[in-house]
């Protein structure tokens, strides 16, 4: 009988450890399936950027993020030319600077709890993090939405994600 209690306790602990969200991660979720398709360690001051090719002027756009207090901070953007759909940064009291043929806007400091990217069919949306580049179309079908969020995830979620790479 004593062995049965020990076994039940061990199984319960394993289940708790596997399924309790306890790792703070930057996640990308496929909105359509609600499945986490990417997870990477999240910690203060971690930086990454996203890139895509603008649909009108066919030039690259880069958006730079930093993680601060479990939020995303869009702190800078760079692009080759203004085009349809490009934001008006006067709203953020920032002045564009032309350098090396690109427009740079620094010190944006736009804080977000999460953000979404509609993965284009020809825009080549990419995530650049930890010296690696990931095409978002490898995680989310083009024409669908990738949802970025900092959240706690379980070992089970991480193992399931690793199994799908």
Image (spheres, grey):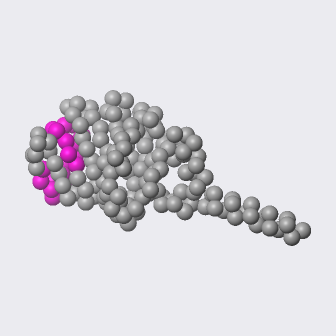
Taking the magenta stretch, the answer to whether it contains residue 80 is yes
Image location (x, y in percent) of residue 116: 39, 47
Q: Is residue 74 above or below residue 120?
A: below
- Residue positioned 64% across, 61% down in the render: 17
Which residues make up the magenta segment?
77-96
Q: Is residue 10 above or below residue 98?
A: below
- Residue positioned 63% across, 57% down in the render: 18
Q: Is residue 111 above or below residue 60?
A: below
Which residue is most to the bottom?
Answer: 2
Of residues 3 and 145, which is closer to you in this image? 3
Image location (x, y in percent) of residue 12: 73, 63
- In which quadrant of the rendered view does residue 20 lie? bottom right
- Residue positioned 38% across, 66% down in the render: 69
Which residue is most to the right?
Answer: 1
Image location (x, y in percent) of residue 60: 23, 37
Q: Could you tell whether 160 is left or right of 80 in the image?
A: right
Res 59 visible:
yes
Taking the magenta stretch, the answer to whether it contains residue 114 is no
């Amino acid at each position: 009988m004593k062995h049965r209690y020990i076994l039940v306790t061990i199984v319960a602990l394993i289940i708790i450890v596997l399924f309790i969200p306890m790792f703070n991660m930057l996640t990308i979720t496929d909105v359509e399936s609600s499945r986490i398709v990417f997870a990477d360690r999240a910690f203060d001051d971690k930086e990454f950027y996203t890139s895509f090719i603008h649909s009108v002027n066919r030039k690259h756009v880069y958006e730079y993020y930093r993680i601060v207090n479990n939020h995303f901070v869009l702190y800078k953007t760079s692009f080759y030319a203004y085009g349809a759909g490009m934001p008006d940064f006067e709203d953020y009291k920032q002045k564009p600077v032309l350098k090396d043929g690109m427009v740079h806007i620094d010190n944006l400091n736009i804080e977000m709890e999460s953000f979404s990217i509609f993965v284009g069919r020809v825009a080549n949306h990419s995530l650049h993090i930890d010296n690696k580049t990931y095409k978002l179309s490898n995680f989310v079908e083009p024409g669908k939405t990738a949802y970025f969020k900092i959240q706690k995830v379980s070992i089970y979620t991480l193992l399931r994600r690793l199994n799908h790479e």
